[in-house]
Image: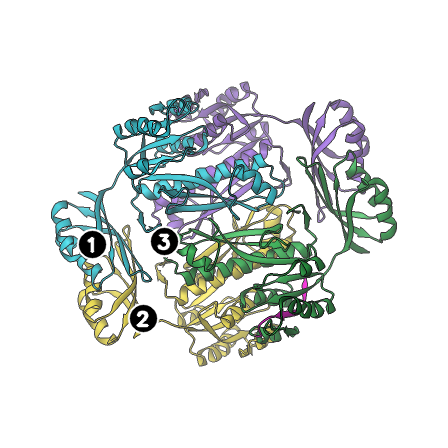
Chain colours: A cyan, B yellow, C green, D purple
Amino acid sequence: MERKVLIIDCADAPGLITKITAACFEHGLNIIKNSEFVDNAQGRFFMRTELEGVFDSANLLAQLQRVLPAINHTKLVDVGKKRIVVMVTKEAHCIGDLLLKSYSGALDAEIVAVVGNYDLLAPLTDKFDVPFHFISHQDMNRVEHEQAMLAVINSYTPDYIVLAKFMRVLTPEFVSQYPNRIINIHHSFLPAFIGASPYRQAWERGVKIIGATAHFVTNSLDEGPIIKQDVIPVDHSYSVEALSKCGRDVERSVLSKALQLVINEDVVVYGNKTVVF
Amino acid sequence: MERKVLIIDCADAPGLITKITAACFEHGLNIIKNSEFVDNAQGRFFMRTELEGVFDSANLLAQLQRVLPAINHTKLVDVGKKRIVVMVTKEAHCIGDLLLKSYSGALDAEIVAVVGNYDLLAPLTDKFDVPFHFISHQDMNRVEHEQAMLAVINSYTPDYIVLAKFMRVLTPEFVSQYPNRIINIHHSFLPAFIGASPYRQAWERGVKIIGATAHFVTNSLDEGPIIKQDVIPVDHSYSVEALSKCGRDVERSVLSKALQLVINEDVVVYGNKTVVF
Amino acid sequence: MERKVLIIDCADAPGLITKITAACFEHGLNIIKNSEFVDNAQGRFFMRTELEGVFDSANLLAQLQRVLPAINHTKLVDVGKKRIVVMVTKEAHCIGDLLLKSYSGALDAEIVAVVGNYDLLAPLTDKFDVPFHFISHQDMNRVEHEQAMLAVINSYTPDYIVLAKFMRVLTPEFVSQYPNRIINIHHSFLPAFIGASPYRQAWERGVKIIGATAHFVTNSLDEGPIIKQDVIPVDHSYSVEALSKCGRDVERSVLSKALQLVINEDVVVYGNKTVVF
Amino acid sequence: MERKVLIIDCADAPGLITKITAACFEHGLNIIKNSEFVDNAQGRFFMRTELEGVFDSANLLAQLQRVLPAINHTKLVDVGKKRIVVMVTKEAHCIGDLLLKSYSGALDAEIVAVVGNYDLLAPLTDKFDVPFHFISHQDMNRVEHEQAMLAVINSYTPDYIVLAKFMRVLTPEFVSQYPNRIINIHHSFLPAFIGASPYRQAWERGVKIIGATAHFVTNSLDEGPIIKQDVIPVDHSYSVEALSKCGRDVERSVLSKALQLVINEDVVVYGNKTVVF
């Protein structure tokens, strides 16, 4: 008995649920959990089905193609630990939490490698017996640096790349190699503060909440499909440094929740948004 | 074109989703929104389907009975405003919020009457042109009092009864007339405080959060199936009265959210718990 | 025995707390509650003291001037219900909540009048026996319209003006008549959406939280000192209309909390930010 | 220049703030931050003052004794990292988080040792170069076991002991050695569930929130003064195991926040409650 997740994304049409679940039933597969969402405004259908049984995957997918609209995104993915490469710069809070949760089983992910453009986080990574690759951006142009990192990353065949406070902007060429498979975290404020020193700006403005947003990376900086957001309350007594500390707390928490959703295959991207089942 | 909600609750079995959605499809009904939940531990299947089209309801229900397990709870209910009778004692916060939200369209419910065992809330109810029935419990025994109230309540043929801080315990006879159709709100603490003056006890204990629980009324006092819970943070500087005020805020908020869920037909009761789609 | 609140805002200096509390003590006043905040980065001192006793206010303030730095903002204000004028356009959620909370005593404020540039909210206001002034902006230029509104508002000598979804931008001339005494509420998103139809933009972007910000009105549109912020979680299944409904819920809640803080004299404005004691 | 925190807890009396701050001023100490709280119902005064300067501590405390009520709790404590011994049984989530936060500087505490009645958490503790002491309760009676643990713990002269899911009840003799210096974390529910398998009971009851409470340990099991509480939302789709996972998340978060408050000297215990400045 295996377990897999079927994800379907296509134009809405009458009878889809019947046809899809009938195909699973005919293959002797048991539906453990099923969710659909129809975006009525856009006439688009999404379905996530956890299946258990003995899979003839090629056959099932072929049968589904016969009943689904011609244009559809359909995938049948294994349940289980995903392979994650984490990219970092200098900050420990997100990578530390991911390493610890992976180690203790609180996150169904294996951190297969950490890549840093500084080497500060090597000692922390070493504690968890995860290889750390220090690839400085010094003495390289952007393209060379990305290619050096990609060479290492690709060698681990990761399912997802997590930017755990990796502070460099990735080029479209890099992003295009892992479409909807690179997850970033960044701080968020109400209102937004553009430019340098956002926590100083937030402090000067006296914001009452500090937030974080985890999203897939696209070519629009910090503008990819949102996976998870959260905030924590702050007040006037918080210094710039205290606001930054709160920011780190909420970033850490939101990133690990977002990653858990992604590795559960709970997240489907469409347009510039997500369905989170 | 009408809209209805189909709710099914039965033992889990292979192919249920296929059979149910196929029946809807054959009746020419469009599935606007569909949700299922399987309690794998108990082998129980729940489904909520919003349908649009021209309904031959008797025929659809008959066809569903042919494909569902013999023992099942199945209902097809109209979408739209539900008729609500609210029972009150002396406190204004919950009834005021319900009247205002019903008036302004923020709650898809019509408050058809308010019944009070005191008359303090008659002026507030009058503002919204809703009939207020003052039925004192003085000079009546419990059974007489409940029967007097039931006579009034039944005359309004309500879909649901909301106890908006109605401070008397209802007898099993009363409750049995509206099974899973009476909604209550009460304060909740961590830890729980039994006995009189719970806010004083909470103050003496220095609790850091104050909560509220909305639930269906069963014969177990304050122990029926939970619909919605929430909390708000408090601290040592709150007096007993300030804690009570916070308690009222969270009660009001939780009760109106719970009622909205119920009138949306989002809530299914089973055992002593709920599925909230 | 009276109760008053002393608010002091000045440059930080050694011994301020001693000198201020000594002055209160010498006047035979009892300190019920005391809070200070020092913005160490800016060297600025804030103090809020609730006093009880028999007040010789002129004398107390004179004595304080002798011990405080030459430049200081010091005020001694009565505790008790503040007079509020509410300005509205078409939306009922905020004004309804304020009227209800004022009526039921949940908010220590008297709504003395409502001014609307449409007349849709007159019936709701009438229910609570509060005068509604319909002053259309049709057939008037901006200055004439504001002067017509100010004439009515000033006649009520309000302590504060609340913009409960008043959808017109106020001129600097209007704002200058009530400095730090006009409170506005607006929706907030992560990220921010500039321009028309923010809820549609938020929907297209798939935001996971919807927020609201209450702030004092200055000449920078929606950019005045923040009093209170909060958010509620949403997901992909929310339509544009459902997001708007959530926005209304959080606006209502944040506005009434912000107003309560202001009328408690818990809020001090400095620069473009607030201390909220 | 040193920094210390002055904590005072005594009967309320007129002029206390003046007298206390005057004493600090006369010693040439600068008040960085000051907070008072008066429990008016009990006539009790609390004050926490962060001081900076050159301390003649004995002299300052002697002078304070001359102006304070005869019975008072007064202490002047150093700011800086506290020494923490953590006691564990088998669960990794709390100890892992504390080790990581201590290592990365997110928590101003030094974990000087971990004591476990099982050895499962030794490998995790070893990663952070913190000594792990395995002291099995097998083959010992309760008194012997506690004395063996105390011998180890005392050798580290800890400021505080943290029970990070230590699953044995401590005797009054143990507790009396560290009054108000032992911090425990436990799950909390609305309503409370007594007896074995609380998560199963919570699941059967269909609770909608899961909480955690951090408190000082007294002789009343799980009933000591509360430091911090929080909850997270759950729903019907959570299995017993998923509820437990949420419980671990909120326990971890609440425990580290509570410990940070305690080591900041922000927490004063009185009666069975706390003031958290």
Rendering coords of residue D24 (x, y %): 77, 30
Residue lying furthest top: D155
A68 vs D12: above or below: below
Looking at the rendered structure, the kind of residue marked 3 is: His
Which corner quadrant holds the N terminus of chain A? top left
Q: Residues within 10 Å of mark 1 (few under 14, many from 20)?
A: few
Q: Residues within 10 Å of mark 2 (few under 14, many from 20)?
A: many
Looking at the rendered structure, the kind of residue marked 2 is: Lys
The disc label shown at residue B4, or none? 2
- Is C116 inside the magenta-drawn segment? yes
Single out the mark in the foreground, 2 or 3: 2
- Which residue position holds label 3? D236
Q: Give me the chain letter of mark 3.
A: D
Q: Are marks 3 and 1 on the same chain?
A: no
**Could you tell me if residue D65 is visible in this image?**
no
Single out the mark in the foreground, 3 or 1: 1
Looking at the rendered structure, the kind of residue marked 1 is: Ile
Q: Secondary structure at mark 3?
A: loop
Rendering coords of residue B139 (x, y %): 59, 77
Residue range of the region highlighted in magenta in the rendering = C109-119
C33 vs C203: above or below: above
Q: Nearer the viewer, residue B41 or B60?
A: B60
- Which residue position holds label 1? A71
Q: Nearer the viewer, residue D206 or C65?
A: C65
Q: Give me the chain letter of mark 2.
A: B
Rendering coords of residue A218 (x, y %): 35, 42
Q: Are marks 2 and 3 on the same chain?
A: no
Q: Secondary structure at mark 2?
A: strand
Q: Secondary structure at mark 1?
A: loop
Q: CA distance from mark 2 to mark 3?
A: 24 Å
Q: Residues within 10 Å of mark 3 (few under 14, many from 20)?
A: many
C97 vs D273: above or below: below
